[in-house]
Amino acid sequence: MTLIARDGRTVMSESAPSTPRLRLRSGGSKGLLDGSWWPRSTDPVAEIPGLVLAIDKLRGPITRMMLYRGDWDSHPRRLAVDGRVVHLGFFASQPPGLLIALAGRAGDRVDLAVIPPGTAAAVAAAAMTLSAEDGNRIHAQDLVPAASGSGAGPLSESPTAGRSPEDAWETDGGHIAAVTPAVRANVTT
């Protein structure tokens, strides 16, 4: 059973932490991601404690996590894990499928792609492999499409790579205001 506190109290799971399905890059050149995590559900109270404990062993104690708000059923602000409190931030501005964990006193950062729980096992395994490759240039939200063959290939550039900032802005939902003749006449160079 999962406890949810809506008043800012620290939340803890009544069940033991699960063993996370986690893949981390072994070293070498830095990629966009440090690896990926494939949770079994979208319940952060049930899923995150096991991930925190696994990263603790590799990078030091996790103190904070930032997650995309739309990936999770609930949004607790503090989670009790192994006798300490981990602060969680759920943001709509965070890229979908990206989890950022801050570890240790020095603030070591771990960027993980979150593979959606309902992803087919073969696609999830391929996405996890791609995320942990040295030099990976695939963003978290593009990882599952790339692994399923409907997106970019291994080590490929982001969909916005090689385009001007204006073109990237246009295709990512922004738009450039059209300059009308009246405005153009007032522009001096």
Image: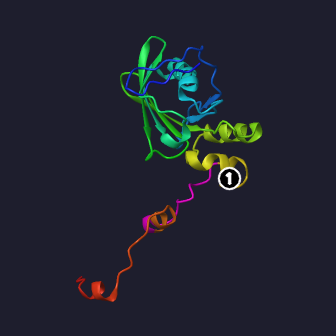
Above or below: residue 81 compared with residue 119: above
Q: Which residue is mark 1?
A: 153
- Expressed as whole percent of the image width and height from the top left, the position of residue 99 reads 51, 36
Q: Tag 1, which secondary structure?
A: loop
Q: Looking at the image, which residue is at 38% across and 74% down?
A: 177
- Expressed as whole percent of the image width and height from the top left, the position of residue 149 reads 73, 52
Q: Looking at the image, which residue is at 55% across and 40% down?
A: 71
Coloring basis for residues? rainbow
Was residue 162 drawn as part of the magenta stretch in this picture? Answer: yes
Q: Is residue 138 visible?
A: no
Closest to the observer, 42 or 185:
42
Q: Looking at the image, which residue is at 60% across and 50% down?
A: 142
Q: The residue under label 1 is which amino acid type? A: Gly
- Quadrant of the rendered image containing residue 158: bottom right
- Quadrant of the rendered image containing residue 179: bottom left
For this orientation, the residue located farthest to the front is 6
- The span picked out in magenta is 155-166
